Amino acid sequence: MAIFEINFYSKMLKRSTTLMAVLPVDRFDKSFSKKTDVDNLKTLYLLHGYAGNHMDWLYGAQIVELSLRFNVAIFMPSGENSFYLDDEDKEAYYSEFLGRELIEFTRNIFPIPEEKNKTLIGGLSMGGYGALRNGLKYNEVFGGIIALSSALIVHKIAGITPDFNNGIASYKYYRHVFGDLNSLIGSDKDINALAKKLKEEGADIPRIYMACGKDDFLIQENRDLYNYLKQIGLDVTYEEDEGTHDWQFWNKYIFKAFEWVNKVFG
């Protein structure tokens, strides 16, 4: 198993950024050949949650084992607390970084496939939102989306007042990250609106896997989104189980997500 920590200058973020990479290219039983083995790989861009970083998935879940077992190259960027949205005030374009720049960079550097149906994006909590939003926004790039315990908070924060503070963040934070909160519903930051628009346009929409714990504080938002996506005809798989917003649940369901990837994408 090859594990890399990569620092490179991002033009979209206007600074150096760090990501972790796990590639199943050094198996003890066979040598990796770029000419013959790349087509058997899949690639997953895996996003951390709020207050996390590029190391979270390596520490919290059995990512190395999953990479080897399912033959998936995994890239884990650092998204700070951006919700993986473009920050126009700071000129730090996290969405463009994910959907364009990081794809180009990793494909140029590593022996990974470039086909849409072998390229996936996933994440937990804030990263689940980021995977859904950017997987749909850059639907020509990603064939599949994995969203665990997704922080689907858009409808909760839309229209909040300057005195708002939910114990996680304040009005100023949400206003900075999401922009005009009075115009949030119906924008391309609203997963429901984005999915509906793509469906009406006849876009090639990625297949989606969602999971959430029954005791998670985000459970209702995840149920509501799943029901809406099914209603408008998207290919979405949803699972619930006992559990809350923690690594015990995410470690279990990232494995199930990889099983889904193996079944759906071969």
Image (spheres, rainbow, N blue to C red):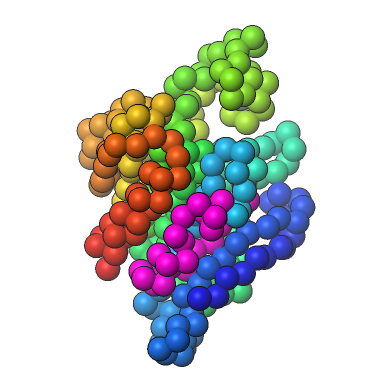
Q: Quadrant of residue 67?
A: bottom left
> Which residue is drawn at the image coordinates 41% and 83% (left, top)?
37
**In-front residue for pair 50/91:** 50
Image check: 117 left or right of 94? Answer: left
User: Which quadrant is the C terminus positioned in?
Assistant: bottom left
65 within the magenta span? yes
Percent from the top left, x then y, of residue 155? 44, 22
State whether residue 84 appears in this view: yes
Percent from the top left, x then y, of residue 76? 56, 57
Q: Is residue 105 above or below residue 123?
A: below
> Which residue is drawn at the image coordinates 23% and 37% (left, top)?
230
**In-front residue for pair 233/213:** 213
State whether residue 129 appears in this view: no
> Which residue is drawn at the image coordinates 40% and 38% (left, top)?
149
Q: Quadrant of residue 193?
A: top left
Start and end of the magenta stretch? Answer: 56-79
Image check: 210 left or right of 194? Answer: left
Q: Is residue 82 above or below residue 60?
A: above
Percent from the top left, x then y, of residue 72? 42, 68
33 within the magenta span? no
> Which residue is drawn at the image coordinates 42% and 67% (left, top)?
65
Query: Which residue in the rendered view is the most extreme toward the right?
Result: 15
